[in-house]
Image: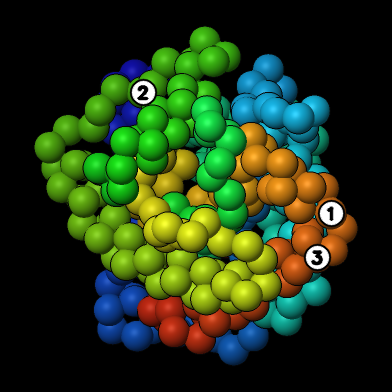
Amino acid sequence: MTRTGRLGGCRIAICAAVALLIGAEFGQASAAGPQIVVAIDAGHGGIDPGASSGGLVEKDVVLGFALRLARQIDATEGFRALLIRSDDTFLTLGERIQRARDGGANLILSLHADTTSGGEAEGAHVYTLSEEGSDEAAEALALRENRAEIIGGVALQGEPDDLALLLVDLAQRGTGNEAQKLARAALSEMDGAVTLLPTEPHRQANFRILKAPEIPSILVELGYLSNASDRARLVSEDWQARMASALARGLRRWANSASPGFLTPKR
């Protein structure tokens, strides 16, 4: 694809995002009864296994939970799940975002399970987008996850021009605010239902999967594969049920306070 073609496609997505923000600003709600489409992005897959520890592999753990969460969301009135991947498939980060767009997603939940060198960190936590991470560990994690873009030999696309960058910044301000609200809503329901990271369960990092300018997105770290207690939870039917239920409740809580423009059907 030529640079002109890339920029044209970029502007189409950006203009849609700006139109969405205008609708949100002036409170243009959709007709009664639309379903909010939740894109569930099970991280990694195929030739990209993600983290591993204690016999568990991240790509398998998050896919299993994604399938359960999809069932929970489909059973929640007013919501519909969209699985970005439903099997052991490798997708670039750009392909994941495009699948969310093509499926008319109102928001993205990206699922992961991290590791740490010491194995002491424990608990689920949520990331929202920031150009600068909460700390060095968050920044290092973002760098590892973003490398999935080139594992399959896929190079990142060229940067758009100054006008496109300005429009992206405008759009991301609105979606960033919604992502913050979504993260707070999810964590409020997760707290007490599952074990949370005791220090800063709401964290920030520069994950590319969170950069769709028109789709509010959060990244949910289900726990640490390097921690024995978290590993036991991640394969527990009871824990998975409680976590899926908490996230579904968080989605309902977010929808009750979301800007109307972000709840309108996208296709």
Residue 226 point in image, percent of width and height = 64, 35
Distance between the alpha carbons at the discs numbered 3 and 2 = 39 Å
- The local secondary structure at tag 1 comes to loop
Is tag 3's residue or tag 2's residue first in the polypeptide sequence?
2
Q: Amino acid at mark 1?
A: Ser
Instruction: Please say which color scheme the image uses.
Output: rainbow
User: Residue placed at 15% from the left, 47% from the top?
Assistant: 166
> 42 or 229: nearer the eye?
229
**Disc 1 marks which residue?**
236
**Disc 2 marks which residue?**
157
Residue 2 seen anywhere in this rendered image of the structure:
yes
Observer-side mark, 3 or 2, equals 3
Q: Quadrant of residue 155?
A: top left
- Farthest right residue in view: 237
- The local secondary structure at tag 2 comes to loop
Residue 215 position (above or below residue 45): below
